[in-house]
Amino acid sequence: MTLAEKILARASGRDSVAPDEIVVAAVDLAMSHENADLVRKSFLEIGVARVWDSERIVIILDHRVPAESEKTAATHKALREFVHRQGIRNFYDVGRGGICHQVLAERGHVLPGMVVVGTDSHTTTHGAFGAFATGIGATEMAGVWIEGRLWFKVPATIRIEVDGEFAPWISAKDLILHLIGRLGADGADYRAVEFDGPLIRRLSVASRMVLTNLSMEMGAKVAFTPVDDTLLDYLREKTGRKMPTSPEYEPDAEATYERVLEIDASQISEPQVACPHAVDRVVPLSELGDVPVHQAVLGSCTNGRLEDLEVAAHLLGGRRVHPRTRMLVIPASQQVLLDAIRLGFIQKLIAAGAIVNPPGCGPCVGVHQGILAAGEVCISSTNRNFLGRMGSKDSRVYLASPAVVAASAVAGRIIHPEEIVKEAVA
Amino acid sequence: MSAESLKLRGRVAARLGDNVNTDVIYPGRYLNITDREMTAEHLFELAYPEIRARIQPGDFLVAGKNFGCGSSREQATAALKYSQVGAVIAVSFARIFFRNSINLGLPVVASPEAVERLQPGEELEIDLEGGSILNLTTGAALKAAPLDPRAIELVTAGGLIPYLKKKHAA
């Protein structure tokens, strides 16, 4: 069995499962953000008094923090009262957490082998922790809050083996954008994706999260990176969760795959950019032509982690954000912000002329903290560039790596990071 | 929805392309609206306001592949349902959108031939259980994926909320 099949078999109490079978699986963790309010409403409408297990529900405010309107303030307030009444202790209020996916990861909520559902499409992120993790809607989550289980169609699995070395300035973001461009927005629809191979095993947990997070943008139901020493060390050091290695967290050698892709990452010779208004409209940076940018955004559940802020601080240190461009930095969590302060990244970014937003989703969902006007162009390390995603329907968002975002903020147009580094040497 | 109404009759209001995403269906800026009926006001607001204006109760929408890709926002389904869209017929659906639709009781029909053989203005009869679409205007019969029994049960119940309400009634 593949890893997806193994986890679903265990969670549904069966010896084995195969693609397209319908199983009912026990849910280990149920996560929601502000849309927990929609879940709450459906839950109350159904009329069951108590949630199935208050310890397995996590609620994290991140989409509109701090509250940007009276309406949101009322939503936050209703959720505070609800979690109190239901005894849900895993509630991360404004200033206590950050982006839901980052908080789940760094607080040790997700462990290998778990079935995790979240009312957020990017819940696929947690496959970097060896979990079968997928997004569901709010009403479906109300059902999980009541029954603690959910039906799934067992997905077929696409295996992606990556070898080779990243060229300078190439990162996990470029790899996954390249794959999305190649496979298309529905290239992995209803499928599980297993990433493996020597290069994947050398990646940090943060970089693996970029791959599993953005697999959503090719339709993946779940996406995994290996449960190896890098991950187990992360869990032990960052969250105090000691896990043994186990064959349970690995696909069988004789597992059946719908498709196996072998990728030589060395072939990705330049940064990849997703053009408006689709994540699969990916081109190598040199094919873009001259694209001036009004805003550069570094953040999100895709690329707002410490290593992302580090590369930006490195590129912006001693340089200035272009006069006609503004740069927004949104650390993915309070912890990322604290670490970035401690390591001096935040000072460098502010000195360069960037504004630092509070940890959260920031402008990614188009509600606050950096909305684009008609005619404006943004280079962003986030995950979606759909029409009107970050503001006006007449604005345009390009997606790229943190390095490209930081370099473009300096140049005022979308640029290869090596160009500004070269300038410094010359 | 009664068992007989697993057959739906309606008119094609519009035909859309591939990868119609949830931001296009329902902009993120309105995600703080949690009253399902009110979501209808913002259907296709940025991308296709003219389509929203054209939809009559019971009308069908036709789309290409991967309809509803992107966010898990249930408001995208709610906005269609409370705009009184009778069903969405697409070449394929993104998985979260598909589940949300079944859970809110919005019929969704996957038909590989949808885009080439259905035009705005045509009258159709859809058999959700049998998996077929009859184009009453042209006489053409199209294959569609039948909804599985679990989905039929939910759609017939009017969605997951009435279904669970009945199941857990004290």
Image: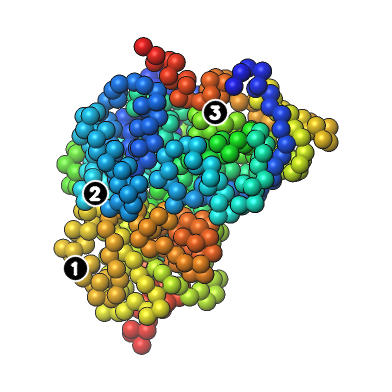
For numbered disc 1, what is the local secondary structure?
loop
Q: Secondary structure at mark 3?
A: loop
**Residue toward you, A311 or A355:** A355
**Among all residues in the image, which is located at the extreme front?**
A70
Q: Examine the rendered structure and indicate whether residue A394 appears above or below residue A39.
A: below
Q: CA distance from mark 1 to mark 3?
A: 52 Å
**Distance in Å between CA atoms under marks 3 and 2:** 35 Å
- Say which residue label 2 marks: A94
Q: Residue at x 19, y 59 (%)?
A: A339
Residue at the spot x=16%, y=41% of the render? A240
Q: Name the kind of residue labelled 1 in the image.
A: Gly
Which residue is tagged 3?
B105
Callout 2: helix, strand or loop? loop
Count how many numbered circles sit on residues in the image: 3
Numbered mark located on residue A311 in the image: none
Q: Amino acid at mark 2?
A: Val
> Would you say A349 lies left or right of B61 here?
left
Dot 1 falls on which chain?
A
Mark 2 or 1, which is nearer the eye? 2
Residue B91 visible from this viewpoint = no
Name the chain under label 3. Answer: B
Kindly indicate whether the residue at mark 1 contacts the one at mark 2 (C-beta within 8 angstroms). no
Q: Position of residue B14 (x, y in %)?
A: 69, 45
Q: Position of residue A191 (x, y in %)?
A: 50, 38
Q: Earlier in the sequence, mark 2 or mark 1?
A: 2
Q: Are marks 3 and 2 on the same chain?
A: no
The answer to the question of whether label 1 and label 3 lie on touching residues, with beta carbons closer than 8 A, is no
The kind of residue tagged 3 is: Gly
Mark drawn on residue A344: 1
At horizontal 36% and vertical 11% (from top left) the residue drawn is B170
Question: Given this view, does label 1 or label 3 mark the residue nearer the observer?
Answer: 3
Q: Looking at the figure, which quarter contains the C terminus of chain A?
A: bottom left
